[in-house]
Amino acid sequence: MTTGGSSRRRRSRRSRLLTRALPLALVAAAGVALGIYELGATARAQRAVVSQYVQAWSRGDFAAMYSLLDAPSRRRLTQSEFVAAYESAARMATLDSIKPGELNGPSGNVIDVATVADTRMFGPLHETLAVPLGGGPRIHFSSTLLFPGLRSGERLHRVTRLGPRGSILADDGTPLATGPNRTTPIPQVAGAIVGSVGPIPSPAASYYAALGYPPHAHVGLDGLEQIFQDRLAGRIGGTLYAGRRPLATIAPRPGTTVHTTIDPAIELAALNALGGSYAGMTVMDPRTGALLALAGLAFDDVQPPGSTMKIITAAAALQAHLVTLGTVFPYQSSADISGFTLHNANNENCGGTLLDAFAVSCNSVFAPLGVTVGAKRLVAAAERFGFNTVPPFPAALESTIPSAASIGGPLAVGSSAIGQGQVQASTLAMADVGAAIAMHGRRPLPTLVYRAKPRFVTATSRHVAAEVQRMMLAVVAFGTGTSAAIPGVQVAGKTGTAELANTSNSTNATKQTDAWFVGYAPAGHPRVVACALFPGGGSGGATAAPVVRQVLITALAVHH
């Protein structure tokens, strides 16, 4: 009895203890659950702010990134300092874009983000971005934020190596520049076209830094060395470091050999023809756009093209069916445009048919004709012939004509139609204008790459090009360009004498005009087109036309 009663009393006591303990256990479990929930909510908020931060970085939105920093970070760094730190790291890594991926954590006060950093120099880098957390939740700024893969206390830096520079060859394979000293067996020709290699110019420092070039690197400064800089330099090599740890390494690749279209014999002929004058010349194969010679101010100077612009004006007027070659204009020494008297050269009296007026370059016909053509059609025609178009290679200046909306009134349009006003052109551009007529209205896109596939754009119709060619043949046969005539060869051309000041009453008018001539041969089966410019050189017929003739003779003899 005693034993049984004792057992019953013990069971009753345990029951009372369990009854009292159950509510306490339930309260404790609820507290744990609440803590877990609050911890999860905090983690979700932290992950959300990190996601916002890296997504803003992928968009380049530094203002949004800065706004997500905690207060201590913003007190330590201004927004401009924050942006500068990111931009410096991007330049060092040659960063193009950031692509954030999966988030991991938080672990302690850090969330890791799987990231792909696309770089120009090293390609895509798959690294982890360590994002420190502050209160709030906010991002706490650390150097680890500046680039994926950085650890605390590390800085990004790069060691760069350049491969050997590629060679430049003429069209016949003769070296124009080769080896570290850029040597050549034809220094006179090479010296006129190759250009130089030297330290990076200050205005281009940020451009080359973004490509990964070290500050001490030498690059092409002008001429072919500048035009083909990317090919000649090859691929820059080096190592990207996070502190002492390499993040990425790429070997340098030697520069490639550039085989150009430059013909040494024609280049030398162009140099000799210019005779050391402040002048320029472009020689082209119109069938391919291959540039056979670029001498002097061939592509890096623009001037008013004068009456060579009448090629475009005539094409625009014929295309719009405003005139025919037989349309007759009155003989006069000047024309009145909006109350302004526009004189012919030397106040000569000219007119007659459109063909005759073109042959003698009659301003009193072509300026009013330009007004009739109108700004829209004139500018559109000029753009089909290559104006207002990005030049075919670096260092070449763009040839321009104001837009139809901004060109101005009738006087401005008439002046533009005869290559005055605000029209500017290079010999490269005007040679291409001549080539478009030579090629039956198809304008070749100029190239310096040997045996590049020819490319053409339509400048005018085949019929209009044939009519303009008839007028250009008349220029050389009996007009202002007779000094370009070659016995036994049909030469088509156009003179230009662009006034740099009012020369109507000047005693030194020849020094105030640019002399131009563009011509090609043989007409009908063209093999070569050339354009010469002599700034302040007098009249196109007297100065530029015989120079082009001299070069055409050489080019026809050596280029087939």
Image (cartoon, grey):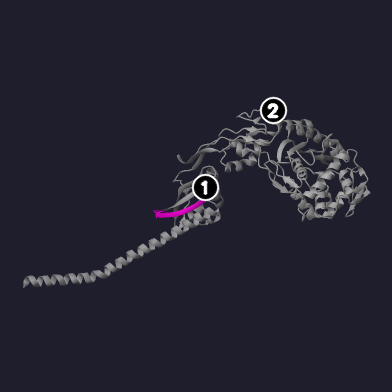
Q: Which residues are magenta?
A: 98-109
* Crowd band around label 1 with a 10 angstrom C-alpha radius: few (<14), some (14–19), many (20+): some
Q: Secondary structure at mark 2?
A: helix
* Residue wearing tag 2: 187
Q: Secondary structure at mark 1?
A: strand
Q: Earlier in the sequence, mark 2 or mark 1?
A: 1
Q: Which residue is mark 1?
A: 118
**Viewer can see residue 422:** no
Q: Residues within 10 Å of mark 2 (few under 14, many from 20)?
A: few
Residue nearest the viewer, comparing 223 with 47: 223
Image location of residue 179, percent across then percent down: 60, 29
> Could you tell me which residue is drawn at 67 percent across and 26 percent down?
185
Front-most of residues 471 and 188 = 471
Residue 73 in sight = yes
Q: Is residue 142 left or right of residue 488?
A: left
Position in image of residue 138 (x %, y %): 47, 57
Q: Is residue 504 above or below residue 190?
A: below
Would residue 107 be counted in the magenta stretch?
A: yes
Q: Are marks 2 and 1 in contact (CB under 8 Å)?
A: no
Three-letter amino acid code at disc 1? Asp
| Residue 403 x %, y % | 76, 53
Quarter of the image for residue 171 reads top right
Residue located 82% across and 52% down the image: 318
Q: Main secondary structure of the magenta part?
A: strand
CA distance separating discs 2 and 1: 43 Å
- Amino acid on which the number 2 mark rests in the picture: Pro
As drawn, is 311 to the left or to the right of 202? right
**Quarter containing the C terminus:** top right
